[in-house]
Image (tube, rainbow, N blue to C red):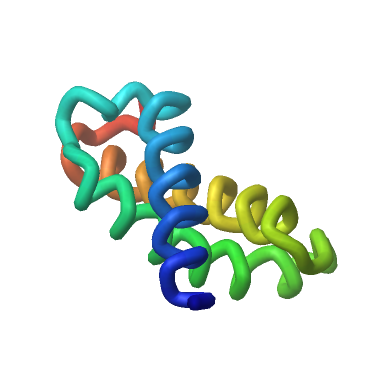
């Protein structure tokens, strides 16, 4: 059951990050979910390292995944275009 929740929260976070970073037209639903899940792992690793813990619950997971997905998309844009945009 948790796996389905991770997919849903990851998909929402990936979709929101793609809207914020203006890459929504370039990627579909599957890539949004993948970016959100990888962003969740990245955010879960980065945020405690800088001393910022958002707590548990689905809202904390969503914000963590969103921040991680934005960082991931910024890195991808940097390598793809030469600028973060």
Q: Is residue 39 left or right of residue 44?
A: left
Counting from the top left corner in percent of width and height, residue 55 is at: 83, 66
Q: Is residue 51 left or right of residue 70?
A: right
Q: Is residue 16 left or right of residue 61?
A: left
Residue at 45% x, 37% y is 17
Counting from the top left corner in percent of width and height, residue 6 is at: 48, 66
In the image, 23 versus 75, the foreground residue is 23
Q: Quadrant of the C terminus?
A: top left
- Total marks shown come to 0
Counting from the top left corner in percent of width and height, residue 65 is at: 55, 56
Residue at 55% x, 47% y is 66
In the image, 59 versus 81, the foreground residue is 59
32 to 53, vertically: above or below:
above
Image quadrant where residue 35 sits = bottom left
79 to 51, vertically: above or below:
above
82 to 32, vertically: above or below:
above
24 to 49, vertically: above or below:
above
Residue at 60% x, 74% y is 45
Residue at 36% x, 44% y is 73
């Amino acid at each position: 059951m948790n796996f389905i929740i991770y997919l849903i929260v990851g998909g929402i976070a990936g979709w929101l990050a793609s809207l914020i970073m203006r890459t929504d037209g370039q990627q579909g639903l599957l890539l949004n979910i993948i970016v959100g899940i990888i962003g969740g792992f990245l955010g879960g690793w980065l945020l405690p390292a800088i001393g910022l813990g958002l707590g548990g619950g689905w809202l904390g997971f969503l914000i963590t995944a969103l921040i991680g997905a934005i960082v991931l998309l910024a890195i991808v844009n940097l390598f793809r275009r030469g600028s973060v945009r």
